[in-house]
Amino acid sequence: MKQEKLKREYVRVWAQGQASFGASQSWLPGRHARACGCGLIACADTLLYLTDRRTLQRTEYLEYVAALRRYFSPIPHFGIDGLRLAWGINRCLARSDLPLRARWCASGTRFWQRVEEMLSRDCPAVIAIGQNFPRFWQKKELTLYRLTPRGEYVADCRVQGHYVTVTALDERYAEVSTWGRRLYVDRREFEEYVKRHSSWLFCNVLYLQEKNP
């Protein structure tokens, strides 16, 4: 598969003379929001990109997110589940007059195909890196990588129960925005994580498609 990526520069949020790659939940007010706000941030960034508001100051961004929060209902200590996330972004898409509808694509065989298709339509792809299942008490996690100036992929952090936004895709890696940074998911490691430690029910893509006329 050839590389597929967004056609325009991704959302940048400026603060103290530096621009992020997408936004970070660590900027949100409140301990719970900072711990569980990844879904809200992923949806906010997607909506900003689709409405072509791709460069903001951090104060502007936080005002925007504050206005969106009423459409998303986080569960205390757990964040926003997939159903609430889809419902919330569909409300926001409608209010923004965007002719799109969001639904979860839980098919493992079509997962990367859906991501690639969305990117080809210049649409960011929010994906869920699900929690451990059925052994939910385990602490198995997926590694995210950073790309060094020498072109090497180096382990950066590990996650589970986390939403990220895919901005580019090639045969091996998915480029993602999370915590205001550009990181990478190894596609083979993602599939292995789903098979061994989670499920396609919890690890899937928020598929945005054109509404039927």
Image (cartoon, grey):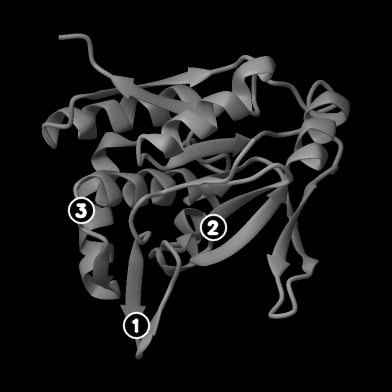
Distance between mark 3 and mark 2 Cα atoms: 19 Å
User: Which comes sooner in the sequence, label 3 or label 1?
Assistant: 1
Q: Is residue 193 left or right of residue 94?
A: right
Query: Which residue is situated farthest in the top direction here?
Result: 213
Q: Is residue 25 left or right of residue 158?
A: left
Task: Say which element carries label 3.
Answer: loop
Task: State the image coordinates of residue 51 (x, y, percent, origin top left).
Answer: 19, 47
27 vs 188: above or below: below
The residue labelled by disc 3 is: 52
Task: State the image coordinates of residue 94 (x, y, percent, origin top left).
Answer: 16, 27
- Around disc 2, counting alpha carbons within 10 Å, would you say few (fewer than 14), some (14 to 19), or many (20 or more)? many
- Around disc 3, counting alpha carbons within 10 Å, would you say few (fewer than 14), some (14 to 19), or many (20 or more)? few
Residue 15: numbered disc: 1
Query: Which residue is situated farthest in the bottom direction here?
Result: 17
User: Which comes sooner in the sequence, label 2 or label 1?
Assistant: 1
Q: Nearer the viewer, residue 16 or 12?
A: 12
